[in-house]
């Protein structure tokens, strides 16, 4: 295809003059990273005055909200109070760790609503709030389901997972994510603390393609201390077949790992979608772990997200798998967008979860 113009920043061919959309967005984010505390406060004020725009994720309001939360870790209590007063229950992240009075207002709405849709949004908002009173409320609602439960697909403990937590039958709180987040950068320093997309020698029994260590994390690197794993965590899969079925792998702390086959519902003569050459492209992604920690929601609103810990950008619904060994909910560990790790050759994102006790990894793919 012949293009008339090139983006002056990245040189990509296109049919219009000026910066491409991706470069425009990158420049916007660079600016947003530099926001001063005063400017952040002004943006929170703008959101209070434009709650309806925020609820409908209109451009400016959505950008203001996500820039403050993702890049600076901020959503003000004032915004939370005004939002609950105006009964704005979306985006749910507004209510992340909201104070007690806001929590109580949300619980009051949840206990009085008869509308299942509204109840569903309120459960998501409270999942983000996530304190012990919310936990008690969710336990109570699971044990004595109100009328609106009939029209919802899942119980409150599954809603809670969106906020990074859940509870077991005895009501004990369990974490299903990690409270630190690290992102990646394209750099060339030889930093091997986390390796993405390393090609292996063994092959997939379904399609014959090469297997890859999708992500391998050195838990002894200082930055990865929060994972509390004193060795290596490796997630292994067939990069082609993982897009069609959830896959598991088992790892040892010495860095070895093995993919678990068969993948559910896959036969042993599937088409191979990722060639050996494609695996090389994946392996040469150039991504290295950032030196600095990011905010928890840094990659929670990014279609091209690659990150460890914090909150994921779920393309469909939040999906926390159960450990096939011990049955407990696994912990969301990482997300890898194919767009970013494979030079745009595939769509969608793979979510990696872990049971640290059983050293089991689950991987599942989502796309629009
Ligand atoms: Zn560009
Ligand atoms: Zn395969
Ligand atoms: Zn387990």
Image: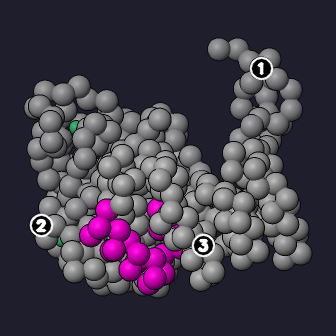
**Residue 325, numbered label:** 2
Judge whether 136 appears above or below 238 on screen. Answer: below
**First along the sequence among labels 3 and 1:** 1
Task: Say left or right for 59 vs 283.
Answer: right
Badge 3: few (under 14), some or many (20 or more) residues near its Cα, within 10 Å?
A: some
Q: Which residues are magenta?
A: 123-145
Residue 153 percent location from the top left of the image: 33, 48
* Model colouring: one colour
Q: Measure the C-alpha gap from mark 3 to mark 1.
A: 51 Å
Marks 3 and 2: which is nearer the front? 3
Number of other residues with Cα within 10 Å of mark 1, as a class: few under 14, some 14 to 19, many 20 or more: few
Q: Is residue 57 above or below residue 8?
A: below
Badge 3 or badge 2: first in the primary sequence: 3
Question: What residue is pinned by disc 1?
Answer: 15
User: Split into 4 quadrants, where in the image is the N terminus?
Assistant: top right
The residue labelled by disc 3 is 105
Q: Nearer the viewer, residue 65 or 262?
A: 65
Q: Residue 32: within the magenta?
A: no
Rounded to the nearest whole Å, what is the CA distance between mark 3 and mark 2? Answer: 40 Å
Residue lying at 19% horizontally and 32% vertically, measured from the top left: 207
- Tell me which residue sits at (82%, 36%) in the image: 19
At mark 3, the secondary structure is: helix
């Amino acid at each position: 295809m012949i293009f008339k113009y090139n983006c002056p920043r990245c040189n990509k061919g296109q049919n219009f003059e000026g910066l491409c959309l991706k470069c425009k967005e990158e420049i916007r984010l660079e600016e947003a990273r530099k926001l001063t505390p005063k400017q952040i406060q002004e943006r929170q004020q703008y959101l209070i005055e434009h709650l309806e725009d925020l609820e409908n994720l209109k451009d400016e309001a959505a950008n203001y909200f996500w820039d403050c939360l993702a890049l600076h870790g901020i959503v003000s209590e004032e915004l939370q109070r005004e939002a609950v007063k105006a009964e704005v229950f979306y985006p749910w992240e507004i209510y992340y760790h909201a104070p007690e009075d806001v929590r109580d207002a949300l619980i009051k709405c949840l206990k009085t609503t008869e509308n299942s849709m509204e109840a569903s949004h309120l459960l998501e908002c409270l999942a983000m709030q996530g304190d012990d009173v919310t936990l008690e409320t969710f336990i109570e609602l699971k044990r004595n389901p109100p009328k609106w439960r009939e029209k919802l697909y899942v119980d409150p403990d599954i809603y809670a997972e969106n906020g990074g937590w859940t509870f077991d039958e005895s009501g004990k709180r369990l974490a299903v994510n990690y409270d630190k987040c690290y992102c990646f950068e394209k750099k060339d320093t030889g930093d091997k603390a986390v390796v993405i997309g390393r090609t292996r020698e063994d092959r997939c029994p379904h399609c014959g393609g090469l297997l890859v260590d999708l992500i391998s994390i050195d838990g002894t690197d200082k930055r990865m201390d929060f994972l509390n794993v004193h060795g290596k965590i490796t997630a292994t899969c067939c990069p082609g077949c993982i897009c069609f079925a959830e896959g598991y792998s088992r790892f040892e702390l010495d860095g070895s790992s093995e993919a678990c086959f068969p993948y559910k519902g896959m036969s042993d003569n599937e088409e191979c979608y990722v060639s050996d050459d494609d695996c090389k492209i994946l392996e040469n992604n150039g991504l290295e772990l950032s030196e600095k920690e990011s905010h928890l929601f840094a990659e929670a609103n990014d279609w091209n997200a690659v990150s460890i810990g914090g909150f994921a950008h779920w393309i469909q619904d939040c999906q926390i798998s159960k450990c096939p060994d011990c049955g407990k909910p696994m912990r969301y560990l990482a997300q890898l967008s194919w767009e970013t790790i494979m030079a745009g050759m595939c769509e969608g994102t793979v979510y990696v979860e872990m049971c640290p006790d059983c050293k089991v990894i689950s991987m599942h793919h989502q796309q629009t």
